[in-house]
Image (tube, rainbow, N blue to C red):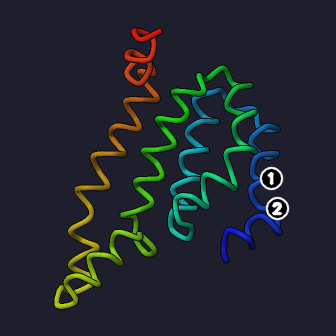
């Protein structure tokens, strides 16, 4: 339902227009895109984020000289963060359903190390894009 709201209000398109009009470099643009996805991860499920935003953001990513395979890898990691990112992380709901005796605050605190590692991975992928492209280039 929230995905429908995001599409109808054109929030994603307005953010993309602002990104395209900004004078940030390519690293700044991709950093803002990651922050945008992390914010969306608070409210949307993974498939909703991908279906709503990729058709709009992919031209911006390509215009900034990024490889689409690299962006796909980055996107998967950011969406996975959304699955464990409070307050709407779907995996948190699964844990809550399987272990209702665990306090929700304890679950949120327990997720922090699992948020830290992918964020470090995102920083590494932005700094060294060849990490994600090494294997696809070998296979070609």
User: Left or right: where does residue 101 sit relative to residue 46?
Assistant: left
Q: Is residue 29 left or right of residue 42?
A: right
Residue 135 locus on image (x, y percent): 37, 17
The residue shown at (34%, 69%) is 91
- The answer to whether the residue labelled 2 contacts the one labelled 1, judged by CB atoms less than 8 Å apart, is yes
In which quadrant of the rendered view does residue 119 lie?
top left
| Disc 1 packing (10 Å; few <14; some 14–19; many ≥20) | some
User: In the rendered image, which residue does mark 1 sit on?
Assistant: 13
- Does 72 appear above or below 69? below
Tell me if 112 is positioned left or right of 129 in this view: left
The image quarter in which residue 139 lies: top left
Q: Is residue 91 left or right of residue 4?
A: left
Q: Which residue is drawn at 22% across and 56% down?
A: 113
Marks counted in the figure total 2
Could you say whether the residue bearing mark 2 is in a helix, strand or loop? loop
> Residue drawn at (79%, 37%), measured in percent from left and top?
20
Q: CA gap, disc 2 to disc 1?
A: 5 Å
- Quick one: SS at disc 1? helix
* Corner quadrant of residue 84: bottom left
Residue at 46% across, 44% down: 76
Q: Name the residue under label 2.
A: 10
Q: How crowded is mark 2: few (under 14 residues within 10 Å), some or many (20 or more)?
A: few
Residue sticking out furthest to the bottom: 101
Of the 4 image quadrants, the one containing the N terminus is: bottom right
- Compared with residue 16, is residue 124 higher up or lower down, i.e. above or below? above
The x, y position of residue 73, in whole percent, is 47, 35
x%, y% of residue 112?
26, 61
């Amino acid at each position: 339902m929230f995905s429908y709201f995001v599409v109808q209000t054109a929030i994603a398109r307005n953010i993309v227009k602002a990104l395209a009009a900004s004078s940030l470099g390519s690293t700044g643009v991709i950093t803002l895109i990651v922050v945008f996805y992390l914010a969306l991860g608070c409210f949307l499920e993974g498939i909703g984020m991908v279906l709503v935003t990729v058709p709009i953001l992919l031209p911006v990513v390509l215009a900034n000289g990024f490889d689409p395979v690299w962006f796909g890898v980055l996107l998967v990691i950011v969406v996975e963060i959304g699955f464990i990112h409070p307050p709407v992380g779907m995996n948190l709901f699964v844990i809550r359903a399987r272990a209702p005796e665990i306090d929700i605050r304890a679950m949120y605190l327990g997720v922090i190390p699992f948020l830290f590692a992918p964020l470090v991975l995102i920083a590494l992928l932005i700094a060294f894009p060849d990490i994600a492209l090494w294997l696809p280039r070998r296979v070609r």
